[in-house]
Amino acid sequence: MEDRINDLISEEIHEECGVFGVYNMVGEDVADSIYYGLFALQHRGQESCGIAVSDTLGPKGRVSSMKGMGLVNEVFTPEGLETLRGDIGVGHVRYSTAGASNIANTQPLVLNYVKGTLALAHNGNIINAPELRRELEYTGAIFQTTIDSEVIAYHIARERLKTANVEGAVRNAMMKIKGSYSLIVMSPRKLIGARDPFGFRPLCIGKKENMYILASESCALDAVNATFIRDVLPGEIVTITKEGILSDTSMCQPKMAKCIFEYIYFARPDSKIDKISVYNSRIMAGRILAQEHPVEADLVVGVPDSGNAAAMGFAMETGIPYGMAFVKNSYVGRTFIKPKQAIRESSVRIKLNVLTEAVKGKRVVMIDDSMVRGTTCARIVGMLKAAGATEVHVRISSPPFLYPCYFGTDVPSDDQLIAHNNTVEQICKIIDADSLGYLSVNRLSELIDGDLGYCDACFSGHYPIEPPTEDIRGEYEL
């Protein structure tokens, strides 16, 4: 089995998926647009991807799909996209936080049932999926995957037998499932988007000429030259038909819990989520770090890519020059050959290398977005010192990870988190930094203009929904 590059040379936190759907009102093919949208969402998942399309003017129930393991440009070829003919479609990029890593778990899921067809793409984690799965199995359901998204699809299909339309079936299914989800559902004549009532994961609406678009992030709208219309509200169901957009807000609620880590790390900096600029959030994180943990230094650098904007914010606040200390290998793909044990400790150099001329003889402030196990951070600190940095002061633009996440982020169990069993001073010694500072939990709201409707459970332990009592990661094989 191939080993993920990030398992070997970094300790990056991953978000589960990205979703992208298109409905072209004048019958033109949409596969190319979905391809470019998924390309812009590649940062949300590099494990697998897929596209499913249908022709609203053709026979009901005919869905063409293409899925595979790998990056978007590895799975799809011009010849392959040419076979995906249809004016409505949905696409998906995946990184598994629940369910095994194999071709069967690749999305979109396509279901054929008595009412026709459904194609579904899901971003998030359903925390009561094991319970719902068992209920379905005892009533005869046969599962083809190990992912919670199939549980959602089954419930929508079953509820469709009781409702007048597919959007009603989505609403009824939402009443049963608990957890985080941004969904795009394609039926033969409709494209439906839905966001969980807490709004954990983002979803937005765009338009380009005769096309309506649903996407995880606004940067994907930019990729197809579409105009951003608005975010889907937490709890909202939007239905796109030939007549336009219909909105159902019956599942909306006052309490929200948008994932704060979208702004710190997951989303691309050129995206806006719920009207907040991701780039501005990261600049603010750097400014707050400078206020909370000032230090005398000669240079501020970011660990690419998500640490760069926070480093700029730190430099703006302190007046210390901002510079580039790392060269990143942009051609490191989803997987690579596992290094032998003798060289694994230095394998981070495959991804990053230090510019000796930039750091030699200087006191360096190194900004990174997070620290999970501490191993990668220690190696990067060591690389800076080996290149001649006289001091390395580490600043992390998020609070310490203390608790696991159950809502679509692969924060591991607490026994694997360096901050769970170590003080900041102890961690500083472990990574061999000259000083260490984290962003304070109580200042996270400043990243999103004082909005208090966010989830910071991985930092605070305050879960907006009661955590599951059993494993929901689904790492079993069929």
Image: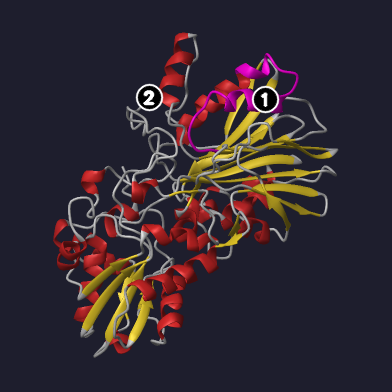
Q: Nearer the viewer, residue 378 or 355?
A: 378
Quick check: can you spot residue 357?
Answer: yes
**Amino acid at pointer 2:** Leu
Q: Residue at x 36, y 34 (%)?
A: 473
Left/right placement of residue 99 relative to residue 395 reads: right
Q: Is residue 175 magenta?
A: yes
Q: Which residue is mark 1?
A: 117
- Asked which secondary structure carries label 2, the reply is loop
Question: Residue 222: x, y in percent?
Answer: 67, 61
Report x, y in % for residue 350. Answer: 31, 67
The region drawn magenta spans 158-181
Front position in the image: 122 or 234: 234
Q: Residue at x 36, y 81 (%)?
A: 300
Q: Secondary structure at mark 1?
A: strand
Q: Which mark is residue 478?
A: 2
Quarter of the image for residue 311 reads: bottom left
Q: Residue at x 44, y 45 (%)?
A: 95
Asked if the stretch drawn in magenta spans residue 313, the answer is no
Q: Quadrant of residue 254?
A: top right
Q: Amino acid at mark 1?
A: Thr
